[in-house]
Image (cartoon, rainbow, N blue to C red):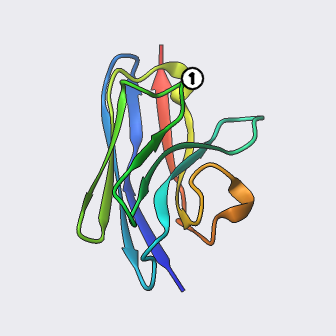
Amino acid sequence: QVRLAESGGGSVQAGGSLRLSCVASGSYGGYCVGWFRQAPGKEREGVAGYYTAGGSRYYADSVKGRFTISRDGDTMTLQMNNLKPEDTGIYYCSAGPSCITESLVASWGQGTQVTVSS
């Protein structure tokens, strides 16, 4: 079983930056570890992921060029720059065969709030 412990998040004005961290434990080799976010009234969507098997990265079109995911051992970090109000939501660390399809996620973190004000 994979356990995910998240930290980071908070409130920032548009154009600002925030960093999220997720420490993974257990057997997650071969999984994609990343983040989904859920905005108020919207479905959860995958925003970034790190494929541990080969080191490739996934980014949703809406965050390309602004978000960067990296790995240091068991810790994944999502650096979020030039934040926009539409980035507001609860961010969930995830681990599973996919960082895009919610139904394929095997484990979830507890979620952390990100609020971007205009």
In which image quadrant can residue 105 be found? Answer: bottom right
Residue drawn at the location 34% of the way across and 56% of the way down: 55
Residue 97 rendering spot, x and y as whole percentages: 59, 65
Mark 1 secondary-structure assignment: helix
Residue found at x 69% / y 64%: 104
- Toward the left, the furthest residue is 72
Nearer the observer, 73 or 14: 73
Label 1 sits on residue:
86
Residue closest to the eye, 74 or 30? 30
- View extreme (top): residue: 118
Q: Amino acid at mark 1?
A: Glu
Image location (x, y in percent) of residue 65? 36, 24
* Residue nearer the viewer, 10 or 30: 30
Figure disc tally: 1
Residue 32 is situated, as x and y percent measured from the top left of the image, at 49, 61
- Residue at position x 38%, y 50% in the image: 56
Instruction: Answer with left or right where residue 17 lies relative to residue 2.
Output: left
Vertical side of 23 occupied by 100: above or below: above
Is 61 above or below relative to 100?
A: above
Image quarter of the N terminus: bottom right
